[in-house]
Amino acid sequence: MFYVLIFCLLVNQQSMGNESLFDSLPASLPAYFPVLAVPTNIQNASTVLLQCGRVYSGELNLEDKFHITVKTEGNCGAATITRGVVVSGWRREAVTKPLWSAAISFQPAQVEVGGRFMELAHFPDSPKIWMTALSPSPSELMISLPNKDVIGASLVWKAHDWLILVNPIVRYASNVISIEKEAQDEFNFPAQTQFYLEGKCWMLDAPGEWCVEQGRLVVWPHDGNSPEGRVSAAIHGPAIKANNANNIVIDNIKIKTATIGIEANNIHHLQVNNMQLEKIGEEAIIIGGKNIHLEHIQINQTGLNGIRFTDDARQITVRDSTILGAGMLGMPKRSKGAIVLEQVEQAQIIGNTVSDSAYIGIRIFRDSVVENNRIDRACLRLTDCGGIYTFARDGHPLHTMIMNNEITRTQGSLSFGIYLDDQANHVQVIKNKISLNAGGMQLHNAYNNLIQENIFYKNTNQQILFNETTAVALIHDNHIINNNFSSADKVPVYRLWSLLGEKSIHNFGVYKANTYAGAHKEVAEFAECAGSGMINWKNWRQRMEDTGFLQFSANE
């Protein structure tokens, strides 16, 4: 206790430390405190105390452990765990460009200079991210490149609007790129494929990039100055690994500059509180198992996902957490979302704030509650996407509640505030505010859902889209009751589309006691119906037996 007190007094009297690894420390931490190795040989039924304000480098291994608590000791700021190591011994490599290199004994997964994230060298450079090439076969692209040295580089390509994949290049001849594909690979190149390349040093042609060549790490710092004393290179892997563990508590710890923040597969009884995770190259947290509780988590910038649960996860709680920039760190890659529970059952996702996500904000499945969350600017890099998303391809009832959430400003023409996809059924969507999104809500082959007491406010393309893409009638008995709709001029409240045409759309839903604020009194574009096109309010009300009413503002 006396040591902790003296340490904290010293911290409060000192000036800000150096950059690189030390940028994660409190501003008052003295520069001369060295980076520590993470504790090893942790015993079961023990408490791991990390000193407040200090940085620990390495992997904290809790695999197969039980009854372990990891927490910060002292009140001078959370202890930090990083996978980054200092790289030194830099020399200038070019006259015309401020390129610097240093010997390195491993392949970095992530590099920072002066605390700023560096992108792996890629071609082309911003603002143009994607090139387009013709595909003569499922594993080939035809393109003339400025440099033929691409074997071993990565080809990052769009398989769909919602999917980005990465494959190594194994051959380049006669302007044809050939990639390595696994036999089970499901996706082939589109006829015209969007892609970019990364990983070769000839692609390093802009500030903020790095590469490795002949055992040397090469960087172009953002400021062009020598990176000596400012470089942290992260080894691939998690900062905390707790696979097959039982009864683990992690409290008041910061994780920075790691490929994965926390990896905990097949864990039983995990409690994570008051965590901060910054600049995580792939997944901030990936967890599978039972009885998992995450509370007051702050995630800032990941390369892929925020919090992702494997399909075997059960009895999940994520509360009062903030996730900023999931999937937005570095160049675009495949992201699944900020909070991802693809086929997880028994989850409660409550009171979280999610903003600026590359893909889905919150993805939920069965026997779950999504309540009082705030989601803003989801779907920034991928579309066919939702702020809140669920599906039920097995056709079984979801019995899931989406309630009192606020979803705003989803991006991309095929994105929606709330998205009920692929036979989603028995979902209650109640008292949400869905505003200023590309689309308000989509029900894609979805049925037997309750949409009640929501506010749909000026979503760009439509407020609700019913989209039936099956060869047999599938959408039916959705109840749209007592909602408040406000549409901009010429934006329909409903779009009802079906491959089966007009005969199917009458079964899509029941419309009762909704309030419609039209942009003009005629409301000629009230709805768009398969087989009829745009129809007005009077026509809609007669055809669908809608018992709602129009409401106009004072200036109309």
Image: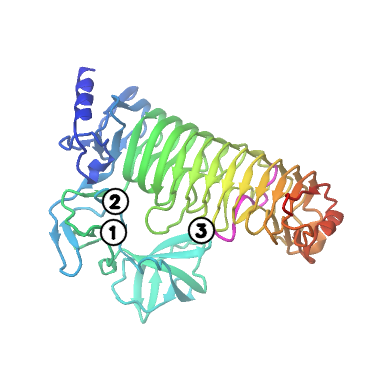
Q: Which is more N-terminal, label 2 or label 1?
A: 2
The answer to whether mark 3 and mark 1 are in CB contact below 8 A is no
Amino acid type, label 3: Leu
Position in image of residue 402 (x %, y %): 63, 40
Residue that sits furthest to the front in the current view: 555
Residue 341 appears in the figure? no
Which numbered dot is residue 382?
3
Relative to 309, 400 lies left or right: right
Image-quadrant location for residue 44:
top left
- Dot 1 falls on a residue whose secondary structure is loop
78 or 257: which is nearer to us? Answer: 78
Give the quadrant of residue 70.
top left
- Against 137, residue 391 (above or below) is above
Is 316 left, or right, of 168 in this rendering? right
Residue 159 point in image, percent of width and height: 50, 64
Asked whether the viewer can see residue 308, the reply is yes
Whichever of labels 3 and 1 marks the residue nearer the N terminus, that label is 1
At horizontal 43% and vertical 74% (from top left) the residue drawn is: 141
Q: Amino acid at mark 2?
A: Arg
C-alpha distance separating marks 1 and 2 = 8 Å
Measured as percent of width and height from the top left, residue 266 is found at: 45, 36
User: Which disc number belongs to residue 208?
Assistant: 1
Q: Which residues are magenta?
A: 412-428
Q: Residue shown at 36%/26% (left/top)?
A: 68
Does the segment drawn in magenta span residue 188? Answer: no
Q: Which residue is mark 2?
A: 116
| Image coordinates for residue 401, horizontal then vertical, percent | 64, 38
